[in-house]
Image: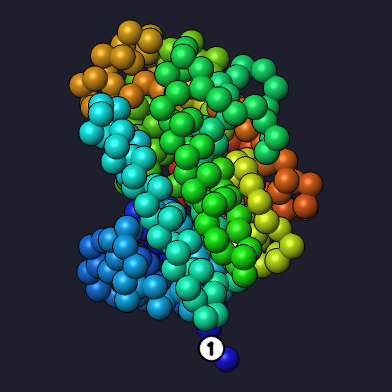
Amino acid sequence: MKPRRIILAGGSGFLGQVLARHFLARGYEVAVLTRRPTSVVLRVREVAWDGETLGPWAQELENAQAVINLAGRSVNCRYHERNRKVILESRINPTRVLGAAINLCATPPLVWLNSSTATIYRHTFGMAWDEAGEIGGTPAAKDEFSVQVAQAWEQTFAAAPTSRTRKVNLRSAMVLGPARNSVFPVLRRLVRLGLGGRMASGRQFVSWIHHQDFSRAIEWLIEHGNQEGTFNLAAPNAVTNEEMMRTLREIHRMPIGLPASLWMLEAGAFLLRTETELIIKSRRVIPGRLMAAGFDFRFSHLREALEDLCGNAITDISR
């Protein structure tokens, strides 16, 4: 029997590597659409595309089990005019051209899963948002641009004319994994240096998901053909920034963790060419639809997730 085939569009980064390993281990064939194909890595075929125009890459979509679109410029940068344009277009254009390619397929993919972000929900210190949560920007969180990008991204996905392909919109929280190009090693390094205290007020909520549950949830959505529409990919229990940093310190037996005030974060963000929104926005999200449908999380609580990652931190999945 021919193996089932997964297409990862823009899948050469951290999340693409996480998903490639997951699906390869389960007997899937995996192909990655990338602007800079190299060779066969991890038994993954890399196929050239520009993320903007139709080309030979579109043949990869024929008879595929699923297309997972991960394309998008990192938001870990300063939001000046040029970067804003690149961030928006790097999400809109790949989504638009994938929709066009799927629509032209003789035998289109069974399901198309498109990335979005849990940042789309309004900044909150109150109740957690499920998929029906309030959407919008908050000046105090400096997230208006990010919310606008997320809305445009989702609107492009919804407008794609792919009537024969099931569509799933993935509002993902921060994915915790051991790779060098993910956030977990950065937080771990801060703790080891004694800098792992609360950031700003520390009251802001952090929504997260262990990389294993991220992969398992996507596989579950592929295999359950009656599931479509928007899903939050986040663990059921968000924590405050203060609790997250304290838990990491306890795991590492680090007695001190110097806090970082808002002005310190602003100065650091300027020097590191990034934005404080990534830290100060309160993201409190729950996976309402996944829980209602019976999906079982392996890592529902942050401590167990961090203990697992710290125990496996020597394994760098980017290698």
Residue appearing at x 55%, y 61% in the figure: 161
Amino acid type, mark 1:
Lys
Residue appearing at x 28%, y 61% in the figure: 50
Q: Is residue 51 visible?
A: yes
Image-based side of 201 in relation to 38, left or right: right
Image-based side of 164 in relation to 56, left or right: right
> How far across and how far down the image is residue 192, in percent?
35, 29
Quadrant location, the N terminus: bottom right
Image-based side of 222 in relation to 19, left or right: right
> How far across and how far down the image is residue 250, in percent?
51, 27
Looking at the picture, does residue 26 appear above or below residue 76? below
Indicate the secondary structure of the residue bearing disc 1.
loop
The residue indicated by pointer 1 is: 2
> How far across and how far down the image is residue 218, in percent?
58, 58
Please tell me how many numbered marks the rendered image carries.
1
Q: Can residue 303 be seen in this view?
A: no
Figure quadrant of residue 94: bottom left
Looking at the picture, does residue 156 appear above or below residue 128? below
Figure quadrant of residue 270: top left
> How far across and how far down the image is residue 22, in percent?
50, 64
Q: Which of 80 and 236 is in front in this view?
A: 80
Residue appearing at x 67%, y 18% in the figure: 126
Looking at the picture, does residue 135 appear above or below residue 161? above
Residue appearing at x 74%, y 62% in the figure: 226
Q: Nearer the viewer, residue 311 or 294?
A: 294
Outermost residue toward the bottom in this view: 1
Q: Nearer the viewer, residue 99 or 20?
A: 99
